[in-house]
Image (tube, rainbow, N blue to C red):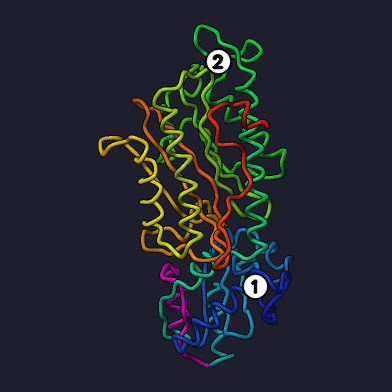
Amino acid sequence: MTDAELPAGGFESETVDSHLESTVRDALERRDADTFVHVGTDDDAAIRYCLSTLEHDLRTDCGTSTVAVAFDGDEWLVESGRDAATHPANALATRLAERINSGTALTPARVPHDAALYLEQAGFDLASTDVLERARATKTDAERDRIANAQAAASAGVRGAASLLADAALEDGTLAVDGDPVTPTRLRTTIDEAIVSAGAFPAGNTVVNPDPGHTPSTPDAEHEPLRAGEPIVLETAPRGPDGYHAGLVRTLVVDGDGGSERRAHVGATQSFRSAAAMVTAGTESVTAVEADLEAEVRAFGFGEGDDIRTRAFGVGLEPCERPLEGGDQIEPGSVVRLESAVRVDDGAWLRIADLLVKGEDGDRATYLEAPSRSLEPSALLE
């Protein structure tokens, strides 16, 4: 694909493309650089993000090849490994040298070594930049709509599992529907089928009874019947057809008798109200929001000896992306997954996670629509 030289913009000229291009232009001007370059496979989220500024058929024609992209403030240049006689980075470097002679090229720190060599051989000095990560951290209206659609599919999946649990009968203390045991595997399959029916892809991100590390707390019990009165954690982060992810966690209890999970549930639920108010009030760091979530949970009688985990991170083309590190700021336009988790018993957790959208300054931060946070399965069906 050696004829790809397109004017800045493309489909969605006032959404992702204009946002990315203005962010890159600012970086080029601030760093006195001549061009931005990235090289990777076309399943790389950063490459997909760049290609979203171009014509739709140009993105889909790339297959699974290596792609090299550049933006000089005016035009995008694209080279793909598909049907190319040389490495895309080499072809791109040659075209850049013909277009702007030489100068400084801003690249992500993780640009492949061979791509860096081609650019240097063409006369460019390389300088590291995080401009893509910064651009992706702030979502456009179109991106927020895509995430909301994926979250709707996640909600359909969790409601499917809640419906199964709401219909469950007790057989010797374990759960069964239509005479068949309700196992983690059965619940996961139910969630994934509902996600697919809602038009999204499970993407291998559905887990039943995971710990805060997103791995099953009891990996050897995938086919064992679930028990009444014990917390059942449902976690999913499906990917929509346009590549954007959701993030949703609910904890359900069938025929529960209260106890520690009820207190943990009250604290976790309150922590989401507090965090939303905090994010609404101003720009806060990931660390500050996570600390606020934990403080609210501990305010409900949990001491330093109790195991409480909280997380805050962005979602988008990847299920976990910037803002991610502790010092990263949750800026206006960010979509972040907030989670509060409390260990309520050996190997058992109560976990809740939702997606929060931070609006422009002065606008109220809002959670994307999702099922009730109740522990009762039937409440999620209302």
- Alpha-carbon span between mark 2 and mark 1: 50 Å
Which residue has dot 2 on it?
Answer: 175
Q: Nearer the viewer, residue 31 or 40?
A: 31
**In this view, which residue lies farthest toward the top?**
172
Position of 291 compared to 330: left or right?
left
* Percent coordinates x, y for residue 130 in the rendering: 45, 71
Q: Which residues are magenta?
A: 101-120
* Percent coordinates x, y for residue 90 in the rendering: 53, 77
Q: Residues within 10 Å of mark 1 (few under 14, many from 20)?
A: many
Residue at 46% from the left image edge and 18% from the top image edge: 257
- Mark 1 or mark 2, which is nearer the start of the sequence? 1
Vertically, is 346 above or below 313? above
Confirm whether the magenta stretch covers residue 110: yes
**Amino acid at pointer 1:** Asp
Task: For the C terminus, give its image quadrant.
Answer: top right
Q: Nearer the viewer, residue 382 or 141?
A: 382
Vertically, is 24 above or below 305? below
What number is the disc on residue 17?
Answer: 1
What number is the disc on residue 248?
Answer: none
Q: Quadrant of residue 98?
A: bottom right
**Amino acid at pointer 2:** Leu
Residue at 41% from the left image edge and 26% from the top image edge: 218
Residue at 55% from the left image edge and 91% from the top image edge: 100
Position of 126 compared to 190: left or right?
left
